[in-house]
Image (cartoon, grey):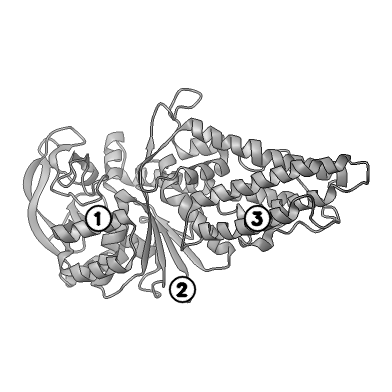
């Protein structure tokens, strides 16, 4: 492959910290794929950004009496710290107000589409708050979606993912709760209908998930919408078109375009393959606007999308020891660690349906790691310390049932490669396979523990210890995409390097005579 596989995740609005739903959505899953491909030696570019110019940032600033730039700066710092603590490692995170050349690049892209008449002015009705003397759009307004009836903010419906700007039923100002009155407003729109054939061809070739295919077919059937790409306001990148002073480029357009900036579009060829991770409510950016921008410029981007549904948070079931809802990523990472949280959100990731976060289920995930994974590793390290002076024994892996177990582990490695790989990506399956590997090895260890007490000879149990060390070594690679922190700690204890390819060859114990260095702390989670 001449270009790296490009993986993206939706830029979050810089209006708050990350919560458990963000991690259960695009970020941890995309990181799992990225880690696996890198370990396999395949070139990857993993990018995102922060939506610092989102309308919600301005609303948060108004409510707190702060400047939007200060709100964006503070939460951008918190968001990037949450990614780091959860082990999500991007190659590039676009920071709109910091990245040199970003604003000019975005404006030039906007002007290019304007010169092609893909973006053009129109005068249409838009809700206006008379009490605040403010135009109501995006996070500034709530109302009922004209397409599905769900109540929410303006811009893109969080339920059906369709644009509803200017069309909300019973719009209400979020600042003062006054009803919005329709007034004529001249703005700039991106026209999708002239791109109908190119977009339809793109969607047919993209092998979209069923819900996205339904969205796109409905858009084609109903007539592709005109999308407002500029608003009158004070926050955001100024619209570069004459005649629109005081207008800002919409977050919807900017979020889609930001992906191209993160890749370095206009400076190098687009990749032969791209995989985008997003929540369904943000899918319009990825599946409609991003390809529309590109096809308008004569470029076709091979796209694949992994779309998750909403990860619900019930305040009662999410309460912590002090009775407060514990849903923020940093709080949960501090209490449970990144291994536990990453594993849990992959198991409960909302695919095809909404799933809900429950604190008691997170505790059960922690118990699995402590009661099965960590207790097995603890027994193994104790056995090496007591029977081998802490050194890897000089024997071949073996023991009763080892041949059958090794055959099963080789199949597990292939199953993991499939579950981690881009063609059949299924991190939930990967977690199940990893658990099966550990459970089978635990049983093998218990069965062979009796060899230590047989009077017919000494050292009969050492091959089984060596076999378990081989499995532990494999987990430093096999578990790396899901739980990199624990895989790294395990590799440190075994004195090997973590994050190798997910392959049967990883089932190789440390060299005989290696002095192990296990920590007294748990290996996975804490």
> For the residues carrying marks 2 and 3, which lies nearer the camera in this image?
3
Q: Which residue bears the numbered disc 3?
A: 408
Residue 23 % position (x, y): 45, 45
104 is higher (above) or lower (below) than 354: below
Inter-mark Cα distance, 3 to 1: 42 Å
Residue 517 % position (x, y): 77, 47
Q: Which residue bears the numbered disc 2?
A: 3
Q: Nearer the viewer, residue 136 or 156?
A: 156
Inter-mark Cα distance, 1 to 2: 30 Å
Q: Quadrant of residue 337?
A: top right
Residue 85 % position (x, y): 53, 45
Name the side, left or right, on which 353 lies relative to 337: left
Upstream in the sequence, badge 2 or badge 3? 2
What number is the disc on residue 215? Answer: 1
Q: Nearer the viewer, residue 71 or 468?
A: 468
Q: Quadrant of residue 338?
A: top right
Name the side, left or right, on which 524 lies relative to 158: right
Q: Residues within 10 Å of mark 2 (few under 14, many from 20)?
A: some
| Residue at screen point 74% across, 56% down | 403
Upstream in the sequence, badge 1 or badge 2? 2
Q: Nearer the viewer, residue 142 or 130?
A: 142
Q: Secondary structure at mark 2?
A: loop
186 is higher (above) or lower (below) than 446: below
| Residue at screen point 31% across, 66% down | 105
Q: Secondary structure at mark 1?
A: helix
């Amino acid at each position: 492959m001449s270009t790296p596989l490009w993986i993206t995740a939706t830029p979050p609005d810089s209006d708050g910290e990350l919560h458990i739903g963000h991690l259960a959505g695009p970020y941890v899953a995309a990181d799992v794929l990225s880690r696996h491909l890198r370990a396999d030696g395949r070139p990857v570019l993993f990018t995102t950004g922060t939506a610092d110019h989102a309308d919600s940032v301005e609303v948060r600033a108004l409510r707190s009496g702060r400047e939007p730039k200060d709100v964006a700066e503070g939460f951008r710092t918190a968001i990037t710290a949450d990614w780091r603590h959860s082990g999500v490692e991007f190659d590039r995170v676009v920071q709109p107000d910091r990245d040199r050349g970003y604003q000019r690049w975005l404006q030039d892209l906007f002007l290019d589409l304007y010169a092609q008449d893909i973006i053009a002015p129109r005068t249409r009705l838009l809700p206006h708050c008379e009490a605040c003397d403010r135009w109501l759009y995006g996070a500034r307004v709530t109302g009922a979606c004209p397409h599905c009836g769900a109540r929410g903010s303006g811009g893109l419906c969080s339920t059906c993912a369709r644009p509803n700007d200017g069309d909300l039923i019973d719009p209400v100002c979020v600042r003062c709760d006054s009803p919005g009155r329709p007034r004529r407003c001249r703005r700039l729109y991106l026209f999708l209908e002239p791109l109908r054939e190119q977009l339809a061809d793109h969607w047919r070739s993209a092998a979209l998930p069923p819900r996205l295919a339904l969205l796109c077919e409905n858009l084609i059937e109903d007539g592709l919408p005109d999308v407002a790409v500029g608003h009158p306001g004070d926050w955001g990148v100024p619209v570069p078109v004459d005649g629109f002073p005081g207008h800002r480029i919409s977050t919807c357009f900017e979020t889609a375009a930001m992906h191209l900036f993160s890749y370095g579009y206009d400076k190098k060829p687009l990749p032969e393959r791209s995989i985008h991770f997003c929540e369904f409510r943000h899918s319009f950016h990825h599946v409609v606007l991003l390809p529309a921008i590109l096809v308008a410029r004569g470029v076709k981007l091979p796209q694949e999308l992994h779309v998750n549904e909403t990860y619900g948070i019930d305040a009662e079931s999410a309460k912590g020891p002090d009775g407060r809802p514990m849903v923020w990523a940093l709080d949960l990472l501090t209490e449970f660690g990144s291994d536990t949280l990453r594993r849990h959100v992959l198991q409960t990731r909302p695919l095809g349906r909404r799933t809900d976060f429950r604190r008691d289920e997170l505790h059960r995930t922690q118990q699995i790691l402590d009661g099965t994974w960590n207790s097995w590793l603890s027994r193994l390290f104790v056995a090496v310390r007591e029977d081998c002076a802490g050194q890897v024994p000089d024997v071949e892996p073996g023991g009763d049932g080892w041949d059958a177990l090794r055959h099963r582990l080789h199949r597990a490695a292939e199953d993991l490669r499939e579950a981690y790989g881009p063609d059949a990506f299924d991190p939930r399956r990967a977690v199940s396979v990893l658990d099966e590997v550990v459970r089978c090895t635990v049983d093998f260890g218990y069965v062979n523990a009796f060899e230590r007490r047989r009077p017919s000879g000494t050292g009969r149990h050492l091959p089984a210890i060596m076999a378990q060390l081989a499995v532990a070594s494999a987990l430093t690679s096999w578990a790396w995409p899901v739980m990199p922190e624990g895989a790294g700690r395990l590799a440190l204890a075994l004195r090997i390097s973590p994050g190798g390819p997910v392959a049967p060859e990883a089932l190789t114990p440390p060299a005989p005579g290696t002095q192990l260095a296990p920590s007294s702390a748990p290996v996975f989670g804490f």
